[in-house]
Amino acid sequence: MTEKQETKDIVIAKVGDKEIKNSDFALFLQSIDQGVVRHFMNQPDGFKTILDELVNQELMLILAKEKNYENDDDFTKTLEMTKNNLLKSYAYQKVINEAAEPSNEEIEKFLSEHKSDFDRPFVNASHILVKTEEEANEAIKKLEEKSFEEVAKEMSTCPSKDNGGNLGDFTKGQMVKEFEDAVFNMKEGEISKPVKTQFGYHVIKLNKINSVQKPDDDTVREEAKKELMRQKQLEHYKEVVEELKKNTKVEILV
C-alpha cells in the first residue's frame, strides 16, 4: 500500500445511507477519554470495539429521528443547556487566548527555580483489574496465600494478566489519573487498596522505582514555556472575571 493510499479518507463502515470514514473515526477517538482509547487500542480487537460503538451511536441517531425526539421538551431543554455550556467554553477559550506569551526572561527565571520539576521518574508496576470493589478485596485476601502473579493470572480482566499483571515501565502522564495518583505515591513492594478508575477496580503492586530521566534542555524549555503560558492564561481569566463582577451583581446565597 502506498503512502497516498494510507492517508486516503476511505469509507470504513455504512449505517443506512450514512458513510463512516477514517476521518469520522479519528474525530470520534478525540471525543473519548484518552485513557479509554489507550486501553482499547492496546487490545487485539480494540479498533473493532471502538468502531462498533461509533456505529451504535449512528443507530441511536436514526432512532431519535424516527421517534422525533428532537421535539421533546426534555430534549429542547437539554439542547439549550448544551448550547449555553458550549458558549461558556468558547468564551473561556477566547479569553485565555488573549494572554500574552511568556518572555525569554520569564522562561529563564522559571527554569532557574523549577528545572528539577521536569525530571521524569519511571516506575515498574503490576495490577489486578476486576469489575467490583468486592472482587478487588477478594484478590487482596488471596495475596496472603498466593503470589501477585498467580492472582493476576487467575482474576484480572486486563490483557496484562498473561504477564502476571506486569504493565512494564511507565512515567507520569501515561496512565489514567486515579491509577497514576496511587502508584506514584507508593513504596517499592507495596500493594495498594482497591483503586477505582473508569476501567474497574485495580489492585496495584509497585515493583520498582527506576532512575529519573532528565529531558534535554530544549524539551525542558518548551515544557516550561507551556507551564508559564498556562499560568498566564489563568491569571488573565481571573482578571477578566473580576472586571465582569464590577458590572454584574453577583450574590452567593449559601
Image: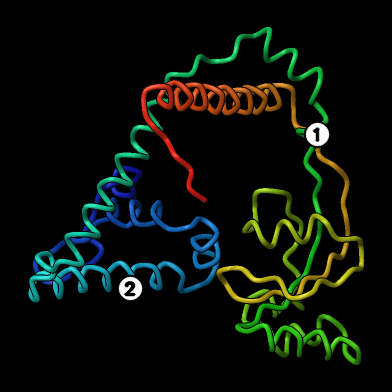
| Number of numbered discs visible in the structure rendering | 2
Going 81% across and 17% down the picture, which residue do you hit?
Answer: 112
Residue 58, image x, y percentages: 21, 68
Nearer to me, 203 or 194: 194
Amino acid on which disc 2 is placed: Asp
Going 84% across and 65% down the picture, which residue do you hit?
Answer: 206
Q: Residues within 10 Å of mark 2 (few under 14, many from 20)?
A: few
The residue where tag 1 is placed is 214
Q: Earlier in the sequence, mark 1 or mark 2?
A: 2
Using the rendered view, name the quadrant where residue 188 is placed: bottom right
Q: Is residue 121 left or right of residue 106?
A: right
Using the rendered view, name the quadrant where residue 160 is placed: bottom right
Nearer to me, 220 or 109: 109
Q: Is residue 76 left or right of residue 201?
A: left
Element assignment for label 1: loop
Residue 113, image x, y percentages: 81, 21
Going 28% across and 45% down the picture, which residue do you hit?
Answer: 84
Element assignment for label 2: helix
**Numbered tag placed on residue 47 in the rendering:** none
The residue where tag 2 is placed is 52
